[in-house]
Amino acid sequence: MRHHGFASMLIFATAACSSQHASVPSPARTAASYAARAGGSVEGVWTVIEQASRAPGGEWVSAGTPYRSLYVFTPTHYSYMFTRPEPRSPFAGDPNRPTDIEKVRAYDSFVAAAGSYTLEGATLTLVALVHKNPSEMAGEALRYAAEIGRDTVRLTIANPPFQPGRERRTVLARIR
């Protein structure tokens, strides 16, 4: 019931803003009206329930569900972090002084990013402000095809920098 009230509020707010401003809608208004039509919103807290990749036109191959994950979308910003399917190994000695090998294993075991986003139609564009991989902080936006429901979001990206020549699909389930 709560979701219906929120969707109605989004539709009302979008209509009110559109009637006051006849110009091109802002990304926030576009995102709100698209989310209202789709029955859901990207705003909220999510966890990854599926990750898969494929060669264009090929069969999807599951990468396994991450061990732990958290995606957070506010009205204009996002943040995410997830680990590989295997549990992360704690540092053997002093946790504030890991060995170089332990640092590499820790770095290789997770992905993290935060920045701003826009949702226009079915295209979700992420622009990283902070990223685990410094090469992905160069201002190059990542554009995903987004299917947004009330409790799931399916994100598909073609030719991502982290898997060139492939497509990557991530499915999120709403936590809150």
Image: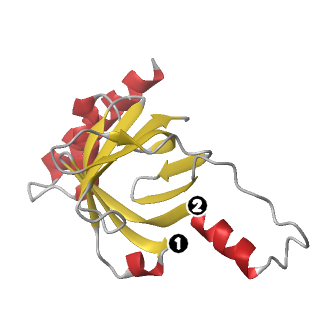
94 sits left or right of 157 in the view: right
Residues packed near mark 2 inside 10 Å, few (<14), some (14 to 19) or many (20 plus) = some
50 sits left or right of 89 in the view: left
Q: Is residue 12 visible?
A: no
Type of the residue with mark 1: Lys
Q: Name the image quarter holding the C terminus.
A: top right
Could you tell me which secondary element the residue under label 1 belongs to? loop
Q: Position of residue 110 (x, y in %)?
A: 58, 60
Q: Nearer the viewer, mark 2 or mark 1?
A: 2
Residue ID at (22%, 51%): 55
Q: Which residue is mark 1?
A: 132
**Mark 2 → mark 1, Cα distance in angstroms:** 9 Å
Q: Position of residue 139 (x, y in %)?
A: 32, 79
Residue ID at (47%, 80%): 134
Q: Is residue 32 visible?
A: yes
48 sits left or right of 121 in the view: right
Q: Which residue is mark 2?
A: 110
Cβ–Cβ under 8 Å for marks 2 and 1 = yes
Residue ID at (22%, 31%): 37
